[in-house]
Image (spheres, rainbow, N blue to C red):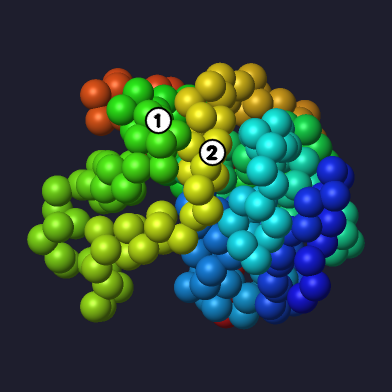
Amino acid sequence: MPHITARDGTRLYAEEAGSGSAVVFVHEYAGDYRTWEPQMRYFSRAHRCVTYSQRGYPPSDVPSEAERYGQTIARDDVLALMDALKIDRAHIVGHSMGSLIALEAAARHPDKVTALALIGTAAAMPVSRDLLAAAEANDHAAVDMVSIWGNGFQAGLGGALVPGAWMVGATMRLLERAKPGVLFKDLAACNVYDGGIAAAARPRAAAASATTSPHAAVSGEAGRRDPAAGSSPSVASSGEDGLRAS
């Protein structure tokens, strides 16, 4: 699939598979379109599935200006992607930072969202000062911190659900692919974001007011990049039907 063009001219790489109701997958920081490969293979049996690389992650463009990154810009990229692919409504699935982007997209245009799946989400995702400083300096310590904190102690002992997977090592390789400065820009955007509760209220209110669309709520554990921080409130998701695969 050719690149699509975002509102500011940034080119975003996307791939799609399957047919049926649309599902758009939004990866977390330091990921790319390949992050969702198992889900693309499974859900494309019954859905039109779309995965893309966010700005900053090749083969999408990597803008050098800090002002061309942020949650609202990333939100607009999701909506631009849907418009370019002529997708009127979609299930939007987001992980970690991607879950906040998905939430903001639903808050901006609830009419374009069939359902939300927010994985590893929270209303706020504070980032530790040490991690931010290491990421800003392009220090590999940032990769080490995220790999250890993000996977936890048990990941170092093996036992991954995917046979042969090394979770800590895979996380390191994923983070090392990011271009210099991109990890810091995304972590900084997560750190300052405080709109989760307000954003969650808007699509839920729209779903509650609809007379023909039943909705369900799904909550996730708090996601954070600061092991010393307390949990923040979870946000809910709603939609008229669920994802399925035959």
| Residue 244 visible in image | yes
Lower sequence index among marks 2 and 1: 1
Left or right? Give the position of 194 relative to 148. Answer: right
Measured along the vertical axis of the image, is residue 160 above or below residue 130? below
Real-space Cα separation, disc 2 to disc 1, in angstroms: 10 Å
Q: Which residue sits at x=68%, y=77%?
A: 17
Label 1 neighbour load within 10 Å: few <14, some 14-19, many 20+: many
Describe the element under mark 1 as helix, strand or loop. Answer: helix
| Residue 117 visible in image | no
Q: Amino acid at mark 1?
A: Leu
Q: Quadrant of residue 214?
A: top right
* Image position, residue 7 (x, y; %): 86, 45
Nearer-the-camera pick, 78 or 113: 78
Q: Which residue sits at x=50%, y=64%?
A: 35
* Image position, residue 221 (x, y; %): 37, 37
Describe the element under mark 2 as helix, strand or loop. Answer: helix
Q: Label 1 belongs to which residue? A: 132
Q: Amino acid at mark 2?
A: Asp
Q: Which residue sits at x=62%, y=51%?
A: 56
* Image position, residue 168 (x, y; %): 25, 59
* Image position, residue 65 (x, y; %): 69, 37
Measured along the vertical axis of the image, is residue 86 above or below residue 104? below
Nearer-the-camera pick, 4 or 65: 65
Q: Label 2 belongs to which residue? A: 186
Residue 13 badge: none
Nearer-the-camera pick, 7 or 103: 7
Q: Which residue sits at x=61%, y=21%?
A: 195
